[in-house]
Image (cartoon, rainbow, N blue to C red):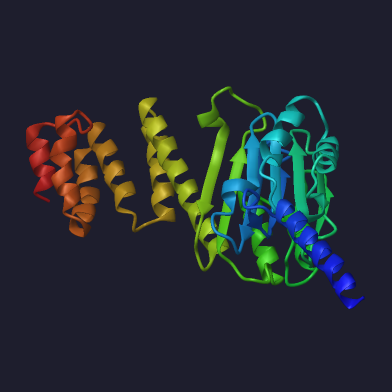
Amino acid sequence: MRKKIIKPLIILLLFSLVTTAQIYNKSEPLAHTYSIVARDNVTGEMGVAVQSHWFSVGTLVSWGEAGVGVVATQSFINASFGPRGLALLKDGLSPQQVVDFLIASDEGRDVRQLAVLDTKGRAASYTGKNCIPAAGNIAGKNFSVQANLMVNDKVWPAMAKTFMETKGPLAERMVATLEAAQKEGGDIRGKQSAALLVVRGKSTGKVWEDRLIDLRVDDSPNPVEEIKRLLKVHRAYDHMNNGDLAVEKGNMSLAMKEYSAAEKMFPENEEMKYWHAVTLANNGKVKEAIPLFTKVFSKNQNWKILTPRIRKVGLLKVTQSELKEILNN
């Protein structure tokens, strides 16, 4: 009798393992994590920010398209939720309809976590009943926060509160939301990677212009701190780009203002100082450029070697005597 009972139990166990393997297969990576999808109600920008104790979390969790919406798919990831979710939004479905459709069609729904937000700021999210606790989600106007495998159930409420109370650009608000999650304990396993994606609310038809921010920290002991640092670098180079644009339009006062703003954010950055100096020289202000060139050369002689080369290809528009003056200081 005992053997007759054990055999069916073994068969049942094997069936259970096979079924589990089908749900948690290798094509569906584990990204137990916390994230936010959000929209700025002033600019219309939409974004996804995420952190996990898993390598390169931004590769599959974060999805977004200007003029359409953003998606975060996590826990035991169904990567198809990203492109399929965006396609369904394009077809006119609401975020709630998108979530309902994707979850209903997925055999692994009990271990999924999903959030969808559209250009109107409507958000919907879902947490499967078998997501590893602590797990949960909160969807509100212009945002949704979701988390699983957390230290405690205070994480996602803290995220929601922080996003709603924080002022400033969308990217900075989302990073602050990640910091709030970590402050409450975050992922029970620790920290490893983070990502930040921001797209325009309205598409220009140019993908390279519509993706405003796309930053990733794939492997770090402090990924949220690092993504915050990278965002600051990104903002500084925005000032540099604005300075270059102002130069093109002949607005030197604005150019100098933008370059100065960038350098104040990163005073030790050699390249910012170098191209600032080049721009001054190209606009007939060689005397003003020389002190900047001198500071850069004193830190790294390779910039000095580079300078005659960029003159040769027309990027530095100075006379031979002016070049000699630059190099001799």
Front residue of this view, candidates 291 and 203: 203
Residue reaching furthest to the top: 205
Q: In the image, residue 139 lies at what x, y percent?
A: 82, 49
238 shown above or below 18: above
| Residue at x-position 29% and y-position 53% | 270
Q: Quadrant of residue 199?
A: top right
Q: Can residue 169 be seen in the rendering of this structure? A: no
Front residue of this view, candidates 280 and 157: 157
Compared across the picture, whether 222 is left or right of 247 comes to right
Q: In the image, residue 295 lies at what x, y percent?
A: 23, 55
Compared across the picture, whether 109 is left or right of 185 comes to right
Quadrant for the N terminus, please: bottom right
Residue reaching furthest to the bottom: 2
Compared across the picture, whether 5 is left or right of 278 comes to right
| Residue at x-position 74% and y-position 33% | 119
| Residue at x-position 8% and y-position 49% | 328
Labels in figure, total: 0
Q: In the image, residue 43 lies at what x, y percent?
A: 67, 36
Front residue of this view, candidates 4 and 14: 4
Q: Can residue 98 be seen in the rendering of this structure? A: yes
247 shown above or below 224: above
Front residue of this view, candidates 201 and 11: 11
Q: In the image, residue 285 lies at what x, y percent?
A: 23, 37
Residue reaching furthest to the right: 1
| Residue at x-position 54% and y-position 44% | 214
